[in-house]
Amino acid sequence: MENLHIEDVNVLIKRRIEELEELRAKGVNPFAYSFSTDSDSADIKNCYVENEKRTVSIAGRIMTLRRMGKASFAHLQDEHGKIQVYLKKDDLGDDYDNFKLLDIGDIIGVTGFVFKTRTGEISVHVEKLFLLTKSVRPIPIPKEIVDENGNKVIYDQFSDIELRYRQRYLDLIVNPDIKETFKYRSKIITSIRNFLDKNGILEVETPILQPLYGGANARPFVTHHNTLDVDFYLRIADELYLKRLIVGGFHGVYEISKDFRNEGMDKTHNPEFTMMEVYVAYKDYNWMMEFVEDMVREVSIKVFGTTIFNVGGTEIDFGKKWHRVSMIDAIKEKTGLDVLNTDDQTLFSKAKAVGVEDLAHKSRGKIIDEIFEILIQDELIQPTFLIDYPVETSPLAKTHRSKPGIVERFEGFVTGREICNAFSELNDPFDQMARFQDQVKAREKGDDEAQQVDEDFIRALEYGMPPTAGLGIGIDRLVMLLTNQSSIKDVIFFPQMKREV
RNA sequence: GGGCGCGUAGCUCAGGGGUAGAGCAUUUGCCUUUUAAGCAAAGGGUCGGUGGUUCGAGCCCACCCGCGCUCACCA
């Protein structure tokens, strides 16, 4: 028992370690080096032909075990599902005695022929058995049956949500259905990448460690570089670096990677999250709206084969053109108030009436934005572009070509949730500097999410950035939407948790 | 951060002041087409943690830790 470094050793683990050593003593390596397979659980079931003796080699984890003396049944689980295997002493000889030292959770490879049992289950009759990895820690053992109506019923399902997030590997073993969501996530990202590549946009990488943070309103994480002896911020957005690349002459660039925001955590916020940002020269936000429509439609069809989704019981269609709603018009329609042209007094009392709090510390633009959130956001169910944002809340967006006080910005909403943010990018260095100064004032007023002045970014704009359309999509939330998940923790393999005690 | 709820065996859960329970899993015996296999027996717990009340605390009280829901803030 030299393996007692396992601290929470219990009788189950102790027994498995004894078995492991017994196997070793018999010349079996409990941690084999490799095994070649030529089939898998899905292939065996899909390609089954009655009365054909097909020999296969497969590998997987033992998930069920029914021993009946000199014969046993087990289910092996591989990436595609489960397949039953049948082992008997007559065929395996001494290896059958080794099999008695195996447990649920062990990973084995088998070679044998495919057959159907008396009760009709396609199975593999094992002729050779190889232990590939001994599992010393017992896994939760759910029992699965199919009832008379063909519904899958699971007993003792591993459901402790905290353990599922902390030990995702275990969750994936025991609740393999959750893999589907993560496979969709992977395909959605691949599909977005394909769409952007196809449009001639270049995938690039920009710094995560930044001396200044910018591109969004958020509090950052701070870290320290020892050799330089300076603090760096973990980026809250990619925006300012990607626009520098447009200045440098790239026609279009995009980046898909992690951003970090030092803020609260809940069902829609993880401290690190995946962002896709894209910038395209010579385009404006009108062009970008169509680009988003095309991209989401294509991703839907390529990944899910449909544009129609069920999101929390509501049917959403990405096949049609998205609605366009003006924030200012929508508020006017709802309240009769022209929020841009009314005086402070009227705006503030209306804001207070609908429930906006802490008015003294907020700009007019922020207050208008919050009135929208309270009165209208939840009503944007089908895919909708909300346009016409007040200038104060959008310091990196270009002013509207004809409407004063407004910027050329849109956000995409589906089922009341924001899924993207885009604008005609501000490329006037003088205006940009003025907007940064306004942010500094906002910070002095107590807004700790206000942006910083980025002198080098201004310098880049002074060299000249072509007219540019920019877009950001929160990938986690897009995946939540398309896979009908209500918690961000269910679309992130390892969501952030407090430290285990 | 506020409010509400939860934490008991490897897993799923009962038990709400008087010797810690069940099913599955584990061990032993029987069992060569079973499938929530079956039959018989056995082992397994610092009841999230620390204090307190009490003759006696999973149980009552206080504080702490973790998780969930919700509100506030944000993508």
Image: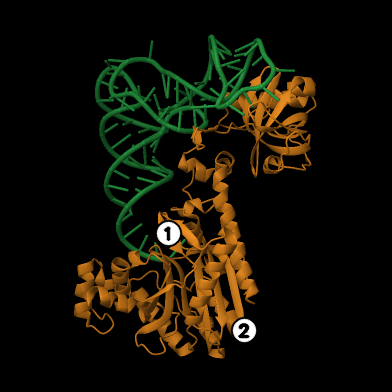
Chain that is orange in the image: A
Taking A46 as reference, is B57 left or right? Answer: left
Percent position of residue A172, x then y: 57, 43
Could you tell me if residue A204 is visible in this image?
A: no
- In depth, the one of B44 and A184 nearer the eye is A184
- In depth, the one of A102 and A437 nearer the eye is A102
- Identified at 57% across, 43% down, the residue is A176
Could you tell me if residue A428 is visible in this image?
A: yes
Give the image quarter of residue A447. Answer: bottom left
Location of residue A42 with respect to B58 vertically, above or below: below
| Same-chain status of marks 2 and 1 | yes
**Colour of the chain lettered B:** green
Percent position of residue A205, x then y: 62, 70
Look at mark 1 in the image and give the residue it sits on: A315
> Does label 2 or label 1 sit earlier along the sequence?
2
Marks 1 and 2: in contact by CB < 8 Å? no
Q: Which mark is residue A248?
A: 2
The amino acid type, in three-letter code, at marker 1 is Glu
Q: Which mark is residue A200?
A: none
The amino acid type, in three-letter code, at marker 2 is Gly
Location of residue A242 with respect to B59 vertically, above or below: below
Give the image quarter of residue A209. Answer: bottom right
- Identified at 46% across, 79% down, the residue is A423
Image mark 1: chain: A
Percent position of residue B12, x then y: 45, 33
The quarter of the image holding the N terminus of chain A is top right
